[in-house]
């Protein structure tokens, strides 16, 4: 006869359902694992109000949860972004808010949710995915490869004195981000098709910066056209002017912004400004003493990671003139045999071939993003590139430094 005691010792049966949330369910079902993982807790009542108020910035997010007995225990979202990959602007799945409740960790639920989420967004047309990892080895398993983090340049604005009185054929206007936001957004969208790796958030999420309105914005114009902009805050008199990315479309745009920063001499002791990883501030001016740094830390302060989700979506991307067959292995989204041809200058892909090159998703993604040399592939454990195929592959995917702009 069964007793209460026997019942207690029976293994518990967990009913897990993985499903995509409707947008009106996000706040109630999608946020609890994220709240617990990313906020100070126990949460103050203000946090609930704040999250509710911010929900309008997340309307376009694609969110997936694992529910156990009806309660969300894992959540993950994709932000529908756009990114320039070798001159080709494609839909980018920005992975965010990946979290599981502590009592279900290390049971493989996050792996299942991410596989389902990435599979669904790949099927709906997303070509690449990127995220800021808490620990890259976790995302290695999902085919992501590391890409460079933007640099920070630090200098004393007094070193740019020569620029203070220079007559430059343009002007800089200054004001709160809330007022200048439209021009700032338009500038980012203008840079998008021009710069490898440049990525932008969807409109619904991007306007957060306008609505929060907690930064100054300096906007450079020539003949009325915006040629540069930088958002910033100032810590105090004698302190630091902390600037976000120095965005510009022309050298004159950059010079106008640097002149504006130079005019903070004696007001602040230091300017810190975020720059593309291949920008060289030591070339900005004679006698400029500058420190360029990047500080990669985990779980906060990571360098981004990215991967290819769809081979089809890469067709037409600007590449070098190589012709090579590759086999991509161990991946749910892009595994297969392909012939990659760049003789026209635009990537053509056909399936099949008789490849001697073997790559996993991270190895292939590293070549596409321009951050790996074929010789790195074997050294990093991302596949095997025979010596005679390496020059073809390097010719097809020349090294290029991607500049990931949008942070999320
Ligand atoms: C990170 C986190 C989401 C992992 O959740 P989890 O439930 O343990 O994940 P899973 O059980 O599905 O593990 C998936 C894989 O990652 C591995 N993994 C888990 N944590 C890891 C870690 N810290 N470092 C490296 N690998 C890890 C697992 O071993 C497993 O590998 P396998 O499939 O080869 O066995 C969870 O610990 C968490 O919510 N942390 C706090 C929030 C956070 O940091 N989120 C990440 C934001 S980028």
Image (spheres, rainbow, N blue to C red):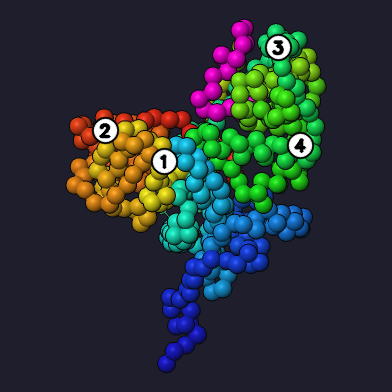
In three-dimensional space, the C-alpha distance between marks 3 and 2, rounded to whole angstroms, equals 46 Å
Mark 4 vs mark 3: which is more N-terminal?
3
Mark 4 vs mark 2: which is more N-terminal?
4
Mark 1 vs mark 2: which is more N-terminal?
1
Q: Give the range drawn in magenta.
A: 273-288
Q: Which residue is drawn at 71% across and 17% down?
A: 169
In three-dimensional space, the C-alpha distance between marks 4 and 3, rounded to whole angstroms, equals 24 Å
Q: Residue at x 62, y 49 (%)?
A: 202
In three-dimensional space, the C-alpha distance between marks 3 and 1, rounded to whole angstroms, equals 40 Å
Please, what secondary structure does the residue beneath circle 2 have? helix
In which image quadrant can residue 11 be found?
A: bottom left
Mark 4 against mark 1, which lies toward the viewer? 1
Label number found at residue 163: 3
In three-dimensional space, the C-alpha distance between marks 1 and 2, rounded to whole angstroms, equals 17 Å
The answer to whether marks 3 and 1 mark residues whose Cβ atoms lie closer than 8 Å is no
Which residue, given by chain and number where applicable, does mark 1 sit on? 317
Q: As displayed, is residue 355 above or below residue 392?
A: below
In which image quadrant can residue 293 be found?
A: top right
The answer to whether marks 4 and 3 mark residues whose Cβ atoms lie closer than 8 Å is no
Label number found at residue 180: 4
Please, what secondary structure does the residue beneath circle 3 have? helix
Residue neighbourhood size for the residue with mark 4, other residues' Cα within 10 Å, grouped as few (<14), some (14–19), many (≥20): some
Q: Is residue 274 magenta?
A: yes
Q: Which residue is drawn at 30% across and 43% down?
A: 340
**137 left or right of 207?**
left
């Amino acid at each position: 006869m069964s007793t209460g005691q026997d019942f207690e010792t029976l293994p518990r049966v967990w009913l897990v359902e993985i499903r995509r949330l409707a947008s009106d369910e996000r706040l109630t079902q999608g946020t609890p694992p994220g709240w617990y993982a990313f906020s100070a807790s126990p949460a103050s009542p203000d946090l609930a109000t704040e999250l509710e108020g911010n929900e309008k910035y997340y309307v376009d997010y694609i969110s997936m949860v694992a529910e156990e007995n009806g309660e969300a225990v894992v959540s993950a979202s994709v932000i529908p972004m756009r990114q320039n990959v070798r001159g080709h602007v494609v839909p980018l799945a920005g992975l965010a808010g990946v979290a599981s409740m502590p009592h279900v960790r290390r049971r493989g639920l996050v792996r299942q949710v991410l596989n389902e989420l990435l599979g669904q967004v790949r099927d709906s047309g997303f070509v690449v995915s990127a995220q800021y990892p808490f620990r890259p080895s976790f995302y290695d398993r999902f085919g992501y490869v590391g890409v460079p983090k933007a640099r920070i340049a630090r200098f004393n604005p007094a070193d740019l004195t020569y620029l203070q009185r220079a007559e430059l054929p343009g002007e800089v206007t200054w004001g709160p981000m809330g007022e200048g936001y439209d021009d700032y957004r338009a500038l980012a969208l203008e840079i998008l098709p021009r710069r490898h790796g440049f990525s932008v958030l969807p409109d619904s999420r991007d306007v957060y910066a306008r609505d929060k309105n907690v930064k100054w914005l300096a906007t450079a114009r020539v003949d009325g056209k915006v040629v540069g902009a930088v958002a910033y805050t100032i810590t105090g008199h004698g302190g630091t002017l902390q600037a976000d990315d120095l965005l510009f479309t022309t050298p004159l745009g950059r010079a106008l912004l640097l002149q504006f920063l130079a005019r903070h001499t004696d007001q602040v002791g230091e300017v810190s400004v975020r720059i593309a990883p291949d920008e060289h501030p030591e070339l900005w001016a004679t006698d400029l003493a500058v420190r360029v740094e990047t500080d990669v830390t985990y779980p906060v302060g990571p360098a981004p990671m990215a991967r290819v989700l769809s081979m089809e979506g890469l067709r037409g991307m600007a590449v070098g003139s190589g012709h090579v067959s590759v086999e991509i292995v161990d991946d749910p989204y892009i595994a297969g045999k392909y012939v990659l041809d760049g003789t026209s200058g635009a990537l053509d892909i056909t399936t099949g071939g008789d490849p001697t090159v073997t790559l996993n998703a991270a190895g292939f993604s590293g070549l596409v993003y321009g951050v790996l040399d074929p010789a790195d592939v074997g050294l990093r454990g991302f596949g095997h590139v025979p010596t005679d195929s390496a020059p073809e592959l390097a010719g097809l995917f020349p090294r290029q430094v991607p500049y990931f702009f949008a942070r999320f």
